Amino acid sequence: MHCNSCVLMIEDTLGELPYITNASSSLNHNSVTVKGDFGTKTKEEIAREFTSLLKENGYTVSVEENEGTKIVKWSEFIIAIPIALFFLALFVLLQKLGIVNIINADKVTYGTAFLVGIVASLSTCMAVVGGLLLSMSATFAKEGDAVKPQAMFHLGRIVSFFVLGGIIGVIGSAFTLNITATFVLNFLVGFVMLFLGINLMDVFPWGKRFQVGMPKFIAKRAHKISSLNHTLTPLLVGIATFFLPCGFTQSMQLYTLTTGGFVEGGLTMLFFALGTFPVLALLSFSSLSISKSKYAGVFFKSVGLIVILFALFNIINSLVAVGIVPPLFSI
């Protein structure tokens, strides 16, 4: 399990079984506790049944306690590190050419928010959003309507991210954040992304304990919207994704507090949502899942390293802004 999205997905999937009354998953212990009427089924039979439901999302269930002895394929870093350094060099080049800086927005540009959105859409943190989209697409496809629901979902997601991001920006401006408060928030965004990158590499299990997450009761209610049978359900599901447990989304929401206004905050979240759009659009028409690929280890280690570099870049910028360290890059 990588993040709070995994927790939500496992609990909801198992909770839909008729004989389960409660399912509670633990990210720190990679475990799930279930209550219900199991009849004469053995623990091993129950574990196999759970695995059959969860294996599509990359999970297996065992009755044995996880000892934390997962084998780390360090050899995958031989490929992952050059890939990450290539993207770092490309990012710096685009910054110098002014291509990434679409519109200047203090520390985190809208172009950077767009790139973070792309990274987020390729990570396991977006698994819940992708799962909702696939489930909803399949349901409406059976009714002969395959395009309209998907269009409504993406419209709801993009518009809501702009509007709700703008509201967060207004809330932040109401507190009149001074230089110190802005520094603290930007520094916190950097550390949130740092631990996201560490968790994506799936090398250090302790990193999961430092993740920022949407309160579970809000995330669960947002997820349950997909079960409503109404023509506006796709639109509502798109809006609800703003409240789902994705660390990348939360890091951008946190930064948006420092933007100081509706337009700036709205555009930050809008560009982030646009960054997630290409992959989510592909998910609308396929069963695209990078986690199932034999190259998944290399991919997630590469993405994790890239996110860590983004995080360090943001932390350094925050320190430069308050004069703690001199500028290291002329970008």
Image (cartoon, rainbow, N blue to C red):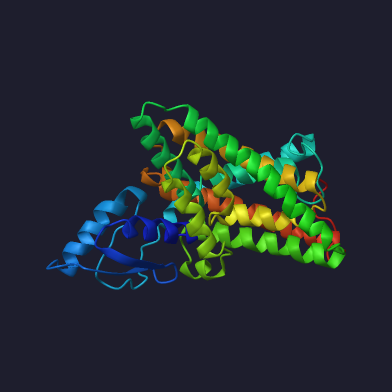
Q: Can residue 317 be seen in this view?
A: no
Nearest the viewer among 258 and 88 is 258
Q: Is residue 183 visible?
A: yes
Nearest the viewer among 313 and 172 is 172
Q: In which quarter of the image is the N terminus?
A: bottom left
Q: Position of residue 22 (x, y in %)?
A: 34, 67
Nearest the viewer among 235 and 120 is 235
Q: Position of residue 154 (x, y in %)?
A: 56, 36
Q: Residue furthest front?
A: 230
Q: Is residue 322 left or right of residue 225?
A: right
Residue at image position (40%, 47%) is 291
Q: Is residue 242 left or right of residue 292?
A: right
Residue at image position (72%, 56%) is 255
Q: In which quarter of the image is residue 70?
A: bottom left
Q: Is residue 19 left or right of residue 292?
A: left
From what the image shows, is residue 214 above or below residue 240?
below
From what the image shows, is residue 149 above or below residue 302?
above
Q: Quadrant of the C terminus?
A: top right
Residue at image position (39%, 41%) is 135
From what the image shows, is residue 283 above or below residue 56?
above
Q: Residue furthest left?
A: 40
Q: Position of residue 272 (x, y in %)?
A: 65, 43
Q: Position of residue 3 (x, y in %)?
A: 48, 60
Give the number of marks: 0
